[in-house]
Amino acid sequence: MKILTVLVLVACFLITLALGAQNQQLVNFDFLIAQGDFQLSTLLGIAFGGGFALGWLICGTLYLKTRFTRNRLMKKVEKQQKELDQLRAEPVKE
């Protein structure tokens, strides 16, 4: 399954390169404080790459946060399970 995912990503990358090679038109891009002329394919590639990186950063951060929370809660459950087992092992005093 992992190989299939890699192949799909490589195919998308190659299609993107092929389409980008056809878009050699120069466009005027205005920054906040400057402007410049870029090829349309380069500008789209930078925007796509930046969005992809930002998405991975956000998803990775949320994934790590979830994993740390899960590990912390699992330790709490194990501790409570040990306490419960100790209470069950003690004889009832009347």
Image (spheres, rainbow, N blue to C red):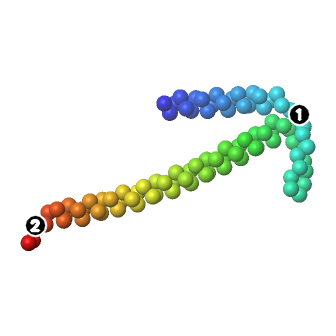
Q: Quadrant of residue 5?
A: top right
Q: Nearer the viewer, residue 79 or 84?
A: 84
Q: Secondary structure at mark 1?
A: loop
The answer to whether residue 17 is left or right of residue 94 is: right
Q: Residue at x 23, y 62 (%)?
A: 84
Q: Percent position (x, y) of residue 73?
A: 39, 59
| Residue 6, horizontal then vertical, whole percent | 56, 32
User: Measured from the top left, where is residue 50 in percent x and y?
Assistant: 71, 47
Would you place residue 94 above or below residue 40 in this image?
Answer: below
Which residue has dot 2 on it? 91
Question: Residue visible at 16% across and 62% down?
Answer: 88
90 sits to left or right of 78: left
Horizontal placement of 74 versus 9: left or right?
A: left
* Residue 89 vs residue 60, the one in the foreground: 89
Disc 1: which residue: 25
| Kind of element beneath mark 2 | loop
**Residue closest to the eye, 61 or 11:** 61
Left or right of residue 1, residue 21 in this image: right
User: How far apart are labels 1 and 2 at the CA level?
Assistant: 84 Å
